[in-house]
Amino acid sequence: MKNIVIIGGGIAGVETACMLAQNGNRVTIIERDSKLFGKLNNWYCLFPDFKKSEELIEFYQNRLEKFDIEIKLNSAVDKAERDGEGWFIYTGNVRYAADAVVIATGYELFDASRKEELGYKIYDNVITQGDLEQRFKDKNFLTAQGKTPEKIAVVHCVGSRDEKCHNLYCSKVCCVTGVKQAIELSKFLPETQILCFYMDLRMYDKFFEELYRKAQEHYNIQFIRGRVSEVSENSDGRLSIKTEDTLSGRPMKMKLDMIVLLAGMETKKNTTEIAKKFGVEQEESGFLKSKDFHIGAGILSEKGIFAAGTCISPMSIKETIENARSTAQQVNEYLNTL
């Protein structure tokens, strides 16, 4: 029986843990927060089928009960030391011996306040997709002035594909998240006009394009190809935006009641801290650098250290689960060589 430590208790960490425990290994999950499942706890529904996030959490809670996995909540890795082929990992007053380590620290949403021109944390009626998910849970869509919004804009690619923010990559799931949230808004607010401002729509996975078509044909969501350049607030609390319809070449000004910013994915600060503790390489973007992009996505530069999920790159939940299973297989193959 081999000992494996998994750093991070989100979906990637939990799925990897279950796969490795199923293979007869002794597994410990070290999680900084007070509960498992990471940002999944914050989402209302998932794309593309609008499955409630609670259903997936319940599935994994039941899955964890099948295995004897040690779970250390409210814990962080204080130090890591190489011990021959393995590692000693210190958290609090506890030392764990590990034959392999899996980093599954997840992602952060881009801090939309860095794009000052869009007004996040300046104007009360500018929110992010994360804020909106909480509103879905609370069934609260009133503006800061206590009114039901008549017109809402969803702004894509905030902090992604943006040289000024030093994020040249596409965060991949923002487009479909915007489509999903626009449909949900239309369901809750059938009289409200919903507009999506996008650079280009990347509906890359099965059913995503269908969801996009459904948003237009069944929910009357309007999609405008153009980037919002400036947001300001009027005396009545409504928002004014400047943009351009790049398909027609027309500059546009518009008044809105609420703006939802689709913030991209960024690597967590503690991912960099963990990477330094284990001596593994990171890409310029901050995501952990895979040894081989095609056949070794979960294998890192330091022997015996692996990664799973969105600490490697932006992924959907489905992709995260698939990646975690792949990483577990890579870990098992490595352990068989010891």
Image (tube, rainbow, N blue to C red):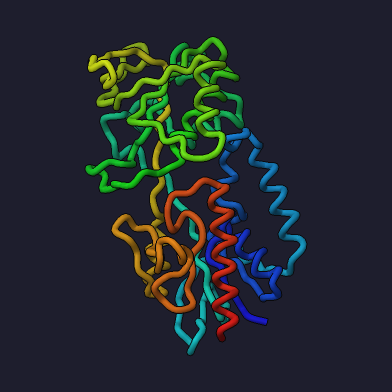
Residue 191 picture location, percent across and down: 54, 10
Residue 27 picture location, percent across and down: 64, 72
Vertically, is 270 above or below 231? below
The residue at the point 33 percent across, 47 percent down is 169
Vertically, is 281 above or below 183? below
Q: Is residue 74 visible?
A: no
The residue at the point 46 percent across, 35 percent down is 203
Residue 134 picture location, percent across and down: 55, 34
Please state if 281 lies on the left or on the right of 101 as rendered: left
Vertically, is 135 above or below 189? below
| Residue 186, image quadrant | top right
Q: Residue furthest bottom?
A: 84
The residue at the point 52 percent across, 68 percent down is 102
Q: Nearer the viewer, residue 42 or 45?
A: 45
Looking at the rendered structure, the number of numbered marks drawn on it comes to 0
Q: Nearer the viewer, residue 34 or 104?
A: 104
The residue at the point 68 percent across, 70 percent down is 21
Q: Nearer the viewer, residue 282 or 136?
A: 282
* The N terminus sits in image quarter: bottom right
Please state if 222 lies on the left or on the right of 32 as rendered: left
Q: Nearer the viewer, residue 297 or 129?
A: 297
Vertically, is 80 above or below 269? below
Please state if 91 lies on the left or on the right of 174 as rendered: right
Residue 338 picture location, percent across and down: 56, 86
Q: Is residue 338 visible?
A: yes
